Amino acid sequence: MQLEDSYQRKFYYLRLSITDVCNFKCQYCLPDGYKPKGKNSGFLQLEEIRRVIAAFAHCGTTKVRITGGEPSLRKDFSDVIAVAAEQPGIEKVATTTNGYRLAKQAAVWREAGLTHINVSVDSLDSRMFHQITGENKFTEVMAGIDAAFDAGFPQIKVNAVLMKDLNSNELPAFLSWIKSRPIQLRFIELMQTGDMDDFFSRYHQSGISIRNYLIANGWLMKAREANDGPAEVYTHPEYQGEIGLIMPYKKDFCQTCNRLRVSALGKLHMCLFGDYGVELRDLLQEDSQRDQLITAIQTQLADKKVSHFLDDGYTGMTPNLAYIGG
């Protein structure tokens, strides 16, 4: 059984948020810090998480990324990793973290079954890192990356949002940093969300300009795998590290979409920038509901749009990237 939409896109990749809380105040996401949005019945519990992952795995999903907010804020984060890793068919269990707990927890997460890790590092300058994230944690995050290598992760992915007139001039420094390190440095193009229209207009830097710079300097694009994320990955014979470019404003970006999202409150989202979420939580209470859950997911896939329409200025219901696990 395979999840497929009306555009023949197959979905091997689940992005599962387990909290929308974050302890950083990144300028492009939560500049004023985390603020709960209305009342909720609490985030998905461990058994609910197990059931939703099991249903997706039954339908051919092979990769789960545990997201937030900051997912490691959950006290049971290691248990969530273990639940994902033990599901038959799940080959990759990944997470995206701001890295503040990484130095202490990398080995624990690896032992629990985490296979891939992304760490957000928007600047290699400690003062700029503080300015962008609102937290003076650069040294701790760098130590966390070292700890992740020591724990046995063969490659670390580092996410950076390059922004005009803020950190865009750090591209050469970032490239130098990965020359002798097995890091896939992922430059994520700033995306417009409902709360950040003015910020986007001021600081947006085109991902295409970064791609053109790389190509002009001898970088070559790698072939994609079925459960890869949206990044175009580039390699260079003189570099141990790689570059991944996530360019949501690039033409036909959505043609290779292979991922679905479930929020920390149990809503299915067809797209990060969709205009609605579908309630699944009532179907996550008993193991016997699995067939109903799968039917609900498949039914909604028929309505998945061909594109996110970001290039038309459409941001959907997404107020910020922490809301449903950007």
Image (cartoon, helix red, strand yellow):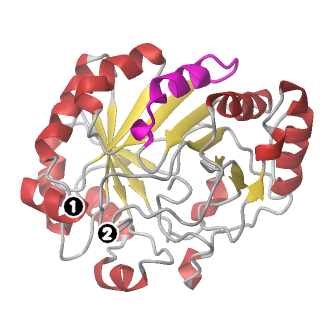
Looking at the rendering, in which quadrant would you find the N terminus? top right
Tally of numbered discs: 2
Residue in the image at 52% along x and 22% along y: 79
Residue 84 sits above or below residue 318 on the image: above
Which label is found at residue 31? Answer: 2
Q: Which residues are magenta?
A: 71-90
Query: In the picture provided, is 189 more to the left or to the right than 281?
Result: left
Residue on which disc 1 sits: 134
Is 158 displayed left or right of 245 in the figure?
left
Residue 181 appears anywhere in the view = no
The kind of secondary structure element at disc 2 is loop
Q: Residue at the location (78% across, 48% down)?
A: 280
Q: Position of residue 257 (x, y in %)?
A: 64, 53
Location of residue 53 with respect to 31 vertically, above or below: above
Q: Report if residue 309 lies within the magenta region.
A: no
Image x and y of residue 226, in percent = 62, 37
Q: Is residue 161 above or below residue 31?
A: above
Tag 1–tag 2 contact (CB < 8 Å): yes
